[in-house]
Image (tube, helix red, strand yellow):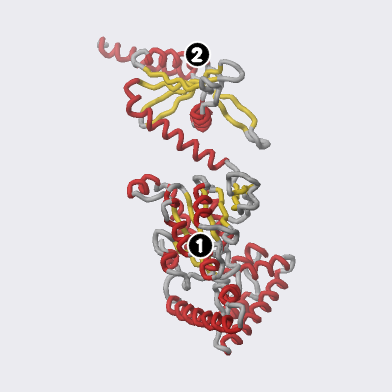
Amino acid sequence: MFPEFTILIWVLITLVSIFILLRLLYHTSVFHIIISWLIFLLDHFHIYHLYKIPQYNDHFQENQLFRKVFTYIRSLPSLEDSDFAALFSGDKPGDILVSLNSDGYVTDTFLRAKVTWIYNKSNNYEGNVVLKMKSKDKKRILVPYIQHIYKVVDDIEQKKKELRIYLNCSSNDNDGLNSQWRSFPFVNPSSFDNIVLDNDVKSKVKNDLEVYLKSKQYYNKIGRAWRRSYLLYGGSGTGKSSYAAAMAKYLSYDLYDIDLSKPLDGSDLKVLLLQTTRKSLILIENLDWYLMGKSNSVSLSTMLNFMDGVVSSCGEERVMVFTMNCKYHIDPLVLRPGRIDVHIHFPFCDFNGFKALALSHLGVKEHKLFSQVEELFEQNVSQISLAEISEIMISHRMSPTRAMKKVIKALQHEVIDGKQSNNVGLEKNVSGRDQVSEELGGSNSKGKREGLNAMKEIQKMYGRLRLKSSRRAQSFDLSL
């Protein structure tokens, strides 16, 4: 036998033996000791930099970076596989938190560089974490890595935080506090899943919000404030307020609800805006009511400055939402791009909306009375709101058939009312006719007649606009 062949056989036998031995030792402490020694030896071939992050500064104030780093370490997937992981109970029953044990370490990878976090706890009240990285990597990854930690932790805290709703105070009820806002827990059942609106429109809005959330650098690059504004318009009871709440919950943003009926001037509005925080949705409802009416609480110029003035550009990561009953009689300056980025139309209830409500409220997907309901919707020249249909179904939820009959009765009344309105040459206005007429009317009969005549002209013009735009796709209003 050739010597070379003999040597090859012995090499193969040795390798197989080592492989079998390692397999046998894999689940034993001996294997981990060997691996630890190998890592220890390899570490001596590199120069490392260590950065200590104490829990408290010299004045015994909490180091915010320590808190963020510790939160970040808890989120690392490698922590669960660490030999130094510790388990703690969470705030909620059944929650288990994985944390790094004292004198333990966990590894992370960033931009193809490996770093190590070491946790040291000197006593029951104070500790520190040490960031260990190769010296050759520190200039390349140190600052981006810390920025990455801040972003990850901000996202974690944003998802965990309790959302709040803020209501503006008048000068008489702020109890001497500097803040013009009062906050309460934001508990609202509305979500994109349970709101009745065209699925294509909801999908486009969600996509638009997602793009906005990821566009900070782009907005900074083009020199614009990082914010987005939406107009929700449609008749009363069509779901505009619920949709605004759903947007805030989808974004995990606090909601700031500005009540324009309280005494406000331009300075008050600016202060309110400056006192809002990042990651907030600012809501103004029924804007057309205030711009069209006689209320002195807000003027057109004040609102224009609020929407895109210098102060509105001082903050970032905010979403503004305005609701209106009708946008066609509003000054175009209010609606131009830059002040309003996205227009979303909320129509009155149609047969598809009725079926969605029947499924969610009554658990009914098909019913023998559906054909009659569909026929009435096709005849209905006036409109009925989603809120009206919803309330009927809630009141008769124990009997779907009775609920259907009540809906049919309500639709029949709407058809009759619509025909009567047509006979006198009036079109039922989806913009809140009665409210706007009351605001336009004066104290004398002449003023009232002039207000009603003006209202009729607006109604006729709006009817022509609706007829002209009825053939357009709904995405035209969405303006995405």
Spatial CA distance of label 1 from label 2 is 59 Å
Determine the residue positioned at 59% across, 85% down: 421
Q: Quadrant of the N terminus?
A: top left
For residue 329, the mark is: none
Determine the residue positioned at 50% across, 40% down: 155
For residue 30, the mark is: 2
Side (left or right) of 289 relative to 475: right
Q: Is residue 89 above or below residue 436?
A: above
For residue 199, the mark is: 1
Can residue 448 be seen in this snapshot?
A: yes
Most extreme residue toward the right is 398
> Which of labels 1 and 2 is toward the front?
1
- Residue 108, image x, y percentages: 44, 28
Determine the residue positioned at 64% across, 53% down: 172
Give the SS element for disc 1. helix
Q: Is residue 439 above or below residue 147?
A: below
Most extreme residue toward the top is 3
Q: Amino acid at mark 1?
A: Asn
Can residue 17 be seen in this snapshot?
A: no
Q: Amino acid at mark 2?
A: Val
Determine the residue positioned at 34% across, 49% down: 223
Give the SS element for disc 2. helix
- Residue 478, image x, y percentages: 44, 64
Side (left or right) of 80 relative to 182: left
Side (left or right) of 323 relative to 401: left
- Between 160 and 107, which is closer to the camera in this rendering? 160
Q: Of marks 1 and 2, which one's residue comes earlier in the chain?
A: 2
Side (left or right) of 310 relative to 431: left
Q: Quadrant of the C terminus?
A: bottom left
